[in-house]
Image: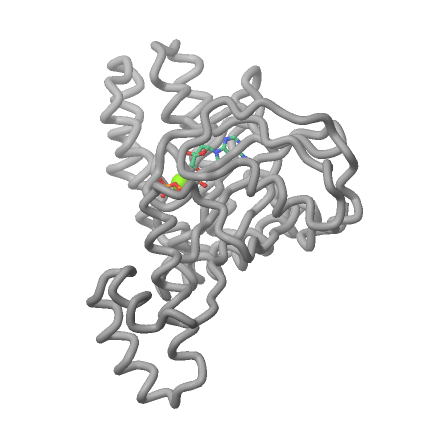
Amino acid sequence: MQVFEANPKLWRPIPNGNNLYPKIINTDKLRKCLCKYDKECAMVYSRIGSPSMDAEVYSIIIDNQEYAAKVLPIVNDKSYDKIERELCFAKITSEAVRKGIVSHFLIYYGHYECNDTIYKEDSKFNIVSQKYALINSIISNMSKVEAKRKYYSLNRMSFEEIRDLYPNIQYDTSSKILFSQLLWGDLRTYLEEDRSEKEWNLIIDQILVCCKELEMLNIGHNDLHLGNILIKDIDTLESVIHDYGRSSNGYNKDDLEQAIDALTRINPPTKILNRLNMILQNY
Ligand SMILES: Nc1ncnc2c1ncn2[C@@H]1O[C@H](COP(=O)(O)OP(=O)(O)OP(=O)(O)O)[C@@H](O)[C@H]1O
Ligand SMILES: [Mg+2]
């Protein structure tokens, strides 16, 4: 598969899949979006990961290979910028892993844009994304100043009110799908069960290496909670960082503090708590 720019020609036909617990996404539409060039190319298997306000992650199978597909809705200018940032850092870190410079980052393969809405009719994302797309279509031919003014006045109205005012405007919602390696799951889920001291120590070691590698690449993650650290291999507990929606250039010392602090809140054994406190005092 081509690095980062996913090539649709590589997706091969796969039988219809189960939609185990789709939430906001209409999985059939997601499947159609993934299969622009090939009718039956992918199987959207199930929704994974802890619930999130901003995105939904699905396990999908393409050509007998599993992937994680993160659906990122474009519902306002802020989400647009966030997605651009996420794509940019996903590309930088994935390339660094491929070059062998670092190893504690999730590998992303590429991204797709879905131009038709893929949200369920009754989901909140559907209505918000429709409103954003409609307003942008209305202001698309206006001067910058006029567009800005119009944007703010329309944004205060409901979707239905805007639709009534502009019944003939055509618009298209969009979202990005970001493909990555499908891994075991996140650290938050892993630590829901009681873990031995050895396991705790391995996890802490992994977090220290993750942060060292962020420092090497001079990246601030800026949102290093336990859901944003994934376990790659459940035997070795090898872990990777992902989700760069808030990342920025320049190492952020607070990343390590945030992750270590999150561990202290899970009630670790006393020896582990002492180690965590020592790290917090001395890093
Ligand atoms: N490649 C993957 N393999 C396994 N699980 C994954 C993968 N990508 C995401 N997940 C699961 O989905 C969850 C949400 O993914 P992600 O952090 O990318 O979304 P998000 O909406 O930006 O989250 P938040 O804003 O809460 O940090 C993760 O915490 C993890 O449990
Ligand atoms: Mg996250």
**Which residue is nearer to you in this view: 166 or 27?**
166
Q: Give the tally of numbered discs.
A: 0
Question: Left or right of 65: which side holds 156?
Answer: left
Residue located 61% across and 52% down the image? 112
**Which corner quadrant of the image does residue 162 belong to?**
bottom left
Against 3, residue 61 (above or below) is above
**Where ligand 2 lies, by quadrant?**
top left
Q: Residue at x 44, y 84 (%)?
A: 141
Quarter of the figure that contains the N terminus: top right
Quarter holding the C terminus is top left
Q: Is residue 263 left or right of residue 99?
A: left
The residue at the point 46 percent across, 39 percent down is: 25
**Residue 231 vertical position relative to residue 152 in the rendered view, above or below:** above
Which quarter of the figure has residue 44? top right
Residue 161 position, x and y percent, is 25, 65
Please say whether residue 263 is visible from this viewpoint. Answer: yes
Residue at 40% in and 43% down: 121
Q: Quadrant of residue 235?
A: top right
Q: Is residue 231 left or right of residue 23?
A: right
Q: Is residue 235 above or below residue 276?
A: above
Foreground residue, 107 or 103?
107
Q: State the scheme by which the image is colored.
A: one colour
Residue 72, percent from left and from top: 46, 49
Residue 203: x and y, percent?
43, 24
Left or right of residue 66: residue 197: left
Nearer to us in this view, 170 or 69:
170
Whether residue 205 is visible: no
Q: Position of residue 220 (x, y in %)?
A: 41, 54
- In the image, 80 versus 259, the foreground residue is 80
